Amino acid sequence: MSKRSRRGPLAALLLLIVMSMVAGGCASGPARDDPHHLVIAVAGHFVAQMRQIAAAYEKVNTDLTIEVQTIPDEAGSWTQRLVTARLGEQLPDIVENVDTLINQLADARVTEDLRPWFARGGELTEDDILPEFLGQYRPLSSPEEIHGMPVSADATVLFYNEHLFQEAGVDLPTDAWTWDDMNAAARTITEAGAGKFYGMVNGDPWQAVYNPMIHLYGSFVYDGETNQSRIGSPEAVKAWERILTPYTDGTYASYGIATSGAAPNFESGKVAMQIGVRGNVPTIRDQLKDPWDVAPIPLVDGKRPVGGGSYGLSMTTTSLRKEVAWEFLTWFYRPDGGMRFLEQTYQAVPPTSVGLAEGVWRDLPGPPHNIDVFDEDAKAAVLAPALPRRAQAVLENSVQEATQKVVLRGVPVSEAFQEAERKVNDALDSR
């Protein structure tokens, strides 16, 4: 798209795109350098909460108006919209970021390096934020830089429905449970349910499950230093076998059921267990009428394969209100600041040490009752690696394709995932 022969038509197209974005609400009406007007853009899932947070901040900063804009939930549209806005100098001052998109947004010069702001030594410093989660916002091209901050320290826990355990005559999960204990319980409950309810229902493997499991077995999904994936290594194959065998032996609901449009889910009361994160809690509380709680991720060889990931907030490179933006972010991460609004909805685990210890999320009535699990798993999580550019999508598609070959066609795990590994590494080599 950068060929000189196309400069004229592309320039016109870019202008058209930027103008349409402005008309669609992705550009601010007031002057870009107006210190009394801050623009924050977040995806649809975050808009309602951010508007509430913005209103609270405006009450303590009465000379400031905050405009909350919406960006697409779909990752491809999200990045395209922001890159185009940067080219047209129409970026918001603060933008929602995602751990797996950090490389794309940083390389496109959408997001600002926050190290100089942290270095001021004010209320918010690098040391205040859980290091593994903050590390997700260090781009591969400049790993010393920090291009965002996590909003929630999302780490996996095991949700369980007490009623279905009792219905099947199975003891409830404990801290000493192993992965084999979990699967044995799932099989018993699935058999007892006879198609009316299931022990577990899992579709395509989730990175927060397979990434820590592969790591535990001694391999990796992606290594930035070598720019390689080893999802098909002998060690990774053992992890995949442990993950996928229950899909085919009656332990879980069949893959066909799990990937159907009407797949039963945990909040429906038809699934006894689900590996999930704190962000699932509001929906479960709203829909599930049975008693339920959470337990730690079960042990594998004495270790817990806890996964996680995050969405975050970033300052933008073209903002002319960076001082105002940093003041907002500093307030946002205080336990009595913006974070408390997210915590009160049950959806967020604070990503700061003080928030974990003192945040209002600890005082919310259950369920879940075993809230320490969220704290402990957040500190132990193996987080999602961010692959360069198109390789991220190739990884996701290749894992899905390999899974389907194994569970639907009976292809050996080693064959399916060695092929997946080749595809991912080809994409990495061609970046």
Image: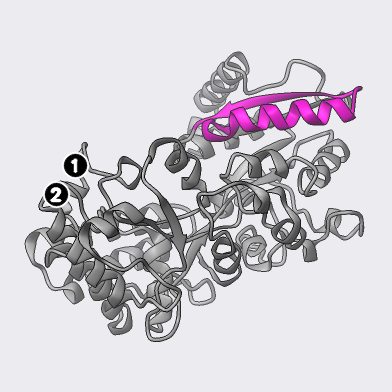
Image point (77%, 49%), residue name: 335
Residue 19, placed above or below residue 420: above
Image point (27%, 51%), residue name: 271
In the depicted view, which residue is nearer to us: 187 or 259? 187
Q: Secondary structure at mark 1?
A: loop
Q: Which mark is residue 260?
A: 1
Tell me the amino acid under the disc marked 2. Gly
Residue 248, placed above or below residue 322: below
Tell whether position 69 is magenta: yes
Q: Are marks 1 and 2 in contact (CB under 8 Å)?
A: yes
How far, Cα to Cα, is label 1 from label 2?
6 Å
Residue position for label 2? 256
Q: Which residues are magenta?
A: 43-72
Whether residue 90 is visible to the viewer of this picture, yes or no, is no
In the depicted view, which residue is nearer to us: 429 or 179? 179
With 309 as the anchor, is 251 left or right in this view? left
Colour pattern: one colour
Query: Pointer 2: residues within 10 angstroms few (<14), some, or many (20+)?
Result: few
Tell me the amino acid under the disc marked 1. Ser
Image point (66%, 34%), residue name: 86
